[in-house]
């Protein structure tokens, strides 16, 4: 079974996912006005279909919930995820 590991690389303003030790995807974010704007999600083609994107989004939303910072879901992939997972809507900036 493949292992996905996510870290917050604050210097790059990216949540970075590795799949079996190889960088597989990122969510580019910007912290501004007391919120985290999830701007863009990128999953490498060879990592698609392994849950990398969803795992990245869950990590970002859980981190926002823990920090108390609301999320601005600018990324269409994040928006689509939120439509399917309304349990995370509490972390979205109204």
Image (cartoon, helix red, strand yellow):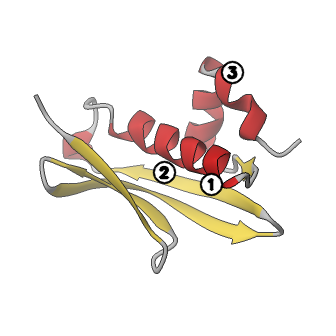
Q: Earlier in the sequence, mark 2 or mark 3?
A: 2
| Residue shown at 89% from the left, 41% from the top | 94
Element marked by disc 3: helix
Give the number of the disc on residue 86. 3
Q: Is residue 10 left or right of residue 70?
A: left
- Pointer 1 residue: 38
| Residue shown at 10% from the left, 28% from the top | 1
Element marked by disc 2: strand
- Mark 3: few/some/many CA within 10 Å (<14, 14-19, 20+): few
Position in image of residue 56 (x %, y %):
43, 44
Instruction: Name which quarter of the figure residue 67 lies in.
Output: bottom right
| 66 vs 80: above or below | below
Give the number of the disc on residue 41. 2
Q: CA distance from mark 2 to mark 3?
A: 19 Å
Instruction: Name which quarter of the figure residue 78 lies in.
Output: top right
The answer to the question of whether label 3 and label 1 lie on touching residues, with beta carbons closer than 8 A, is no
Residue mark closest to the camera, 3 vs 1: 3
Residue with the most extreme bottom position: 11
Foreground of the two, 23 or 87:
87
Residue mark closest to the camera, 2 vs 3: 3
Position in image of residue 49 (x %, y %):
27, 29
Q: Is residue 48 left or right of residue 59?
A: left
Element marked by disc 1: strand
Q: Earlier in the sequence, mark 3 or mark 1?
A: 1
């Amino acid at each position: 079974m493949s292992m996905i590991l996510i870290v917050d690389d604050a210097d790059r303003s990216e949540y970075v996912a590795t799949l079996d030790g190889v960088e597989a995807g990122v969510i580019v974010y910007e912290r501004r006005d007391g919120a985290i704007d999830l701007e863009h999600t990128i999953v490498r083609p060879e990592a698609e279909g392994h849950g990398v994107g969803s795992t990245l989004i869950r990590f970002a939303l859980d981190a926002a919930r823990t920090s108390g910072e609301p999320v601005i879901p600018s990324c269409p992939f994040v928006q689509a995820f939120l439509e399917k997972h309304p349990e995370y809507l509490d972390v979205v900036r109204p």
